[in-house]
Image (tube, rainbow, N blue to C red):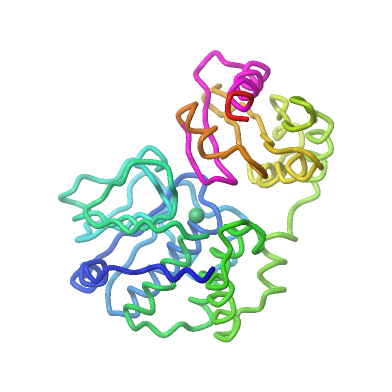
Amino acid sequence: VKTEPRIPRRLVETLETASRVLVTTHRSPDGDAVGSSLALARALERRGKTATVWIPRGVPRPYRFLPGVPQVREGDDPGGSHDLTVVVDTSEPKLLEVPLPARRERGPLVVIDHHLTGGRWGDVVVCEHVAATGELVWELLQAMGVEVDAELATCIYVAVVTDTGMFRYDLTTSHTHLIAARCLDAGVRPSEVARYVYESYPASYLEVWAELLSTLEISLDGRFATLTVPPGLLEKHGASKDALEEVVAYPRGIEGVEVAALLRYKDDGRVRASLRSTGRVSAARLAAAFGGGGHFGAAGCNFEAGVDTARARELLEAEIERSL
Ligand SMILES: [Mn+2]
């Protein structure tokens, strides 16, 4: 299927009339969130605007090589006043790390997103069911007539590569590949991106993974597999939360498994489940049953205070059984 997302004229007009734009995204930003934010800000600057990318807790390690990262604004205050704010890759306000400034400081709100779940928010909303927000930003660059150089292309390429799981997930279309191809034409070096994003982790990650993989539990006749992060695991090995990214791919890859989950305690003591689906059960619907959201294949949710990882596992099992 070749899906070419449409960019409404109103979005282009809204961006063209702004002069100081704030660009931000969801907490625990992934490659799509960071890549899309940086690409958009860069494009706006090319159009003569001032654009500030605001990522309150900073850019996670795998994406720090991207152009524009040193200029990213960190902290709870985006600083200055803006006449437009764009939030990318974020289906609802509660997914932001820090609430947006008051409207008089941030101007109208544009939301560019590709998630199925969550309410539509913002004054101008573009929400298309494509593989990555980066695809929408790519289309937007075309609509704005911005020439894509190697730096812009690298941001878009990282967004697309990471959100498609290296072109493996269902929403990967020929159009996704076409965008990637154009990025290569513009000078992206795939091996370099892969090395930064996927192949430059500290040794402590392997120590974390070794312990984590030994927590594997399989149930529901082999259809549900979980990994559980023991409290203090990251501290013990001096690893950051980034070490847990995508480890859930291992239980997900077990033959016969339809749903995989990584269970961990958040800083506030509540349990978070990162969910991956390979079959009939939608990870997004499963997450939504517990107040979370995401995509069919990948989603997440937080359980209520007092629910421990064992109980979270049982609740997920019951919900999966209901939908099978
Ligand atoms: Mn995304």
Snapshot quadrant of residue 258: top right
**Picture coordinates of residue 38 (x, y %)?**
45, 66
Q: Quadrant of residue 110?
A: bottom left
Residue drawn 36% across the image and 56% down it: 127
Q: Which region shows up in magenta?
A: 292-320
Q: Which residue is drawn at 31% across and 46% down?
A: 120
At 64% across and 24% down in the image, what residue appears? 321
Residue 216 sits above or below residue 43 on the image = above
On screen, residue 259 versus residue 301, left or right, reads right
Count the labels in the image: 0
Q: Does the magenta stretch include residue 319?
A: yes
Q: Which of 290 and 29 is in front in this view?
A: 290
Residue 237 screen position, x and y as percent: 76, 37
Q: Quadrant of the C terminus?
A: top right
Q: Does the magenta stretch include residue 209?
A: no
Residue 59 drawn above or below residue 301:
below
Horizontal side, residue 170 vs residue 133: left or right: right
The N terminus sits in image quarter: bottom right
The answer to whether 290 is drawn above or below residue 205 in the figure is above
Where is residue 232? Give x, y as percent: 70, 27
